[in-house]
Image: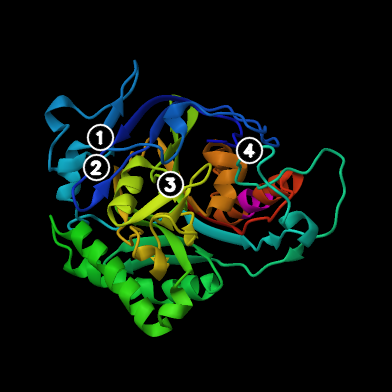
Amino acid sequence: WGFIAVGMLRVSALALCLLAGADAFSGSIPTAMKPQLRAPAVSRRAPVAIKMGLFDGFQKAVSDGMKTPAEEGAGSSDLDEYQGYILPEGMREFTFDNRETRELASVGQFSLGGQNAPVEVAYEAPRQQGWSPFGMFQKEGAGGPQRADKENQDGTLVKPYMYDGVSTFCIFDGHGENGRRVSEWCEKNMPSYLSNAIAEGRQGQLLNRITDAYRAADQALLNEFGYAAVEDSGTTMACMMNKGDLLLVAGLGDSRVVLGLEEEGVLGAQAVTLDQSPSVAAERRRIEAAGGEVRGEGVGRVYAAGQQFPGLAVSRAFGDADGKQYGVTVDPQFIGWKIRPECDWVVIAASDGVWNAIGNENAVEICNKYRETKDAQNAAREITETSRKVWESVARGRIDDITCVVVYL
């Protein structure tokens, strides 16, 4: 898997938990981060522990110095027993009930639309230098025709205290001919679906109710737009919900949520989503069981077995009605996190236009520049603009839409 790496993070541990019906995941826990912003190296391979999305089932890597829940609380259903990631038994009982609403320090968002590849570049064979999220790379010093701006299909949902003190922040990354329509529909309608799920989601039922809400919204989207409009169009959704000291992330596709932390004076970046790509083993099995197959380099694409359609590069999304016949699902994956006030200080949600360009660690490093003033708006702006500069410096093909939401805790 060709991988673009910027200021790679040293990782000491990974915790990944899988729940039947509603998946709960936790990413890598870093021991150090000292990144330098720079253009990514071509074909650099990351350590396996931080290849987002390439994990399956229950895995746990433990090294010296990793902080884990107390032995008596490791499988507890009592959320107060946890610090950091919440294990499966706690996730089954996850609830926002009886949590005191906390005031968030600040919230900011920023978005830049992408650009289409020049016509004479777009149809060149992209395999000579291997797969990458940037397409073909511009040779050093080479010129070329100008790109044309494309419709920005990304979207955001920023709802502090959306319902019963639960704040909700989402990133949407639309794709296909009607990707912008789909992401706009989700921006408008998901607050009511999520609010109802929170209202009905008592202890032991919240994750099920949120999953039901995603399914109901996806069906309503199909009913309203019609099959033809969402046959090959859809959107990812990375949703983070917070009340008090609890953070719940419901991930759909390859938009990502990252937590910024500091332990003993060292910055860290804790991913709290896993990129749901067709090449992930568990995703591939579901796709193949539904009569689909995964082909292609990198993240892979979903196809009907033996056919050339639909060719979808994510395995979970709203819309994408054709892909739903071949194993693509709208069911989210969940991570629960018990916020540690002494070290957890910012949450970043962004489309893959950010993560493919600067990575988790550099996004946290940028937020750290604005940490004292809690200037979330300028942090989101700099993350987005820095990502765009990286795309412009290395991407010869299409430049992706880039969108970011920053929440200082």
- Asked if residue 221 is positioned above or below residue 212 in the image, the reply reads below
Q: Position of residue 8 (x, y in %)?
A: 56, 29
Q: What crowding class fits label 2: few (fewer than 14 Cα within 10 Å), some (14-19), or many (20 or more)?
A: many
Which comes before the other along the chain, label 3 or label 2?
Answer: 2
Q: Position of residue 409 (x, y in %)?
A: 42, 49
Tell me the CA gap for discs 4 and 3. Answer: 20 Å
Which comes before the other along the chain, label 4 or label 3?
Answer: 4
Q: Which residues are the magenta region?
A: 381-385
- Report the residue that reaches farthest toward the top: 64
Magenta highlight on residue 63: no
Q: Position of residue 149 (x, y in %)?
A: 73, 66
Which residue was labeled with disc 2? 18
3 and 2 marks in contact (CB < 8 Å): no
Which residue was labeled with disc 4? 130
Q: Position of residue 133 (x, y in %)?
A: 60, 46
Label ID, residue 275: 3
Tell me the CA gap for discs 3 and 2. Answer: 15 Å
Q: What crowding class fits label 3: few (fewer than 14 Cα within 10 Å), some (14-19), or many (20 or more)?
A: many
Is residue 231 in sight in this rendering?
Answer: yes
Which residue is depicted at the point 40% across and 37% down? 54
Tell me the CA gap for discs 1 and 2. Answer: 6 Å
Left or right of 4, for residue 198: left
Label ID, residue 58: 1
Q: Amino acid at mark 2?
A: Leu
Secondary element at image label 2: loop
Query: What is the quadrant of residue 282 in the picture?
Result: top left
Is residue 163 in sight in this rendering?
Answer: no
Q: Nearer the viewer, mark 2 or mark 4?
A: 4
Secondary structure that dominates the magenta span:
helix
